[in-house]
Amino acid sequence: MELGLEKNEVKLFPYTAEWQKEFNRVKQQIVIVTGLGENRIQHIGSTAITNMPAKPIIDILVGVDDIAKVDRSLFKALQKIGFLRLRVERPGEIVLAKFTDDTYEVKTHFIHMVEFENELWKNQLFFHNYLNSNAKARDEYRMIKVNSAKLKDININLYTDLKEPFVKSIFNKRINKG
């Protein structure tokens, strides 16, 4: 199993069960170095959706009590297993990445650190669960991803923007349900 893409690269690979195995391996490392409960570490993103083509990067959701009070010891612990904090600014989220080597060119894993069981947490898990249980939605998302990835001048920002309306429509299903 090959993992990793460069900064602006968009390539989709066929689904493989190896992605789940890699998540499980890294999850155990995170539990060991941070002491976080296993329920606070979840596999998200397309590599967590059965039969979904995906960028070969494992997305991991990590739930903390208060995103504003995350201390350096947590970042140091995650650094021991190769995760570095990125300068990405997202409301209510801290992003870390793991790279193939010290050139920091090719990312293989992302940690999306959010507050445990808040809206971001719930939306990410709902999206994952909804697509895994709804073949029609999964097929629609697959087509959006595949068609977007084929575009001539595709980059990661455009790719994300093209998927966003669909993703938000699924988040809205959770919000309107409750």
Image: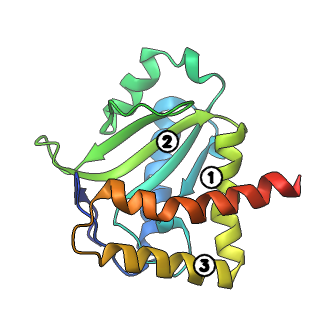
**Label 3 close to label 1 by CB (< 8 Å):** no
Disc 1 from disc 2: Cα separation: 10 Å
Which secondary structure lies at badge 2?
strand
Q: Which residue lies at the image location 42% right of the left edge and 37% below the top edge?
A: 95
Q: Which residue is mark 1?
A: 124
Q: Is residue 136 above or below residue 91?
A: below
Q: Is residue 8 above or below residue 32?
A: below
Q: Residue furthest left?
A: 103
**Label 3 close to label 2 by CB (< 8 Å):** no
Q: Is residue 52 visible?
A: no
Three-letter amino acid code at the position of disc 1: Gln
Q: Is residue 152 above or below residue 43?
A: below
Disc 3 from disc 1: Cα separation: 15 Å
Residue 144, position as x, y percentages in the image: 48, 76
Sequence order check: which comes first, mark 3 or mark 2? 2
Task: Check disc 2: other Cα within 10 Å, few if <14, some if 14-19, many if 20+.
Answer: many
Task: Check disc 3: other Cα within 10 Å, few if <14, some if 14-19, many if 20+.
Answer: some
| Mark seen at residue 112 | 2
Q: Which residue is mark 3?
A: 138
> Which color scheme is applied?
rainbow
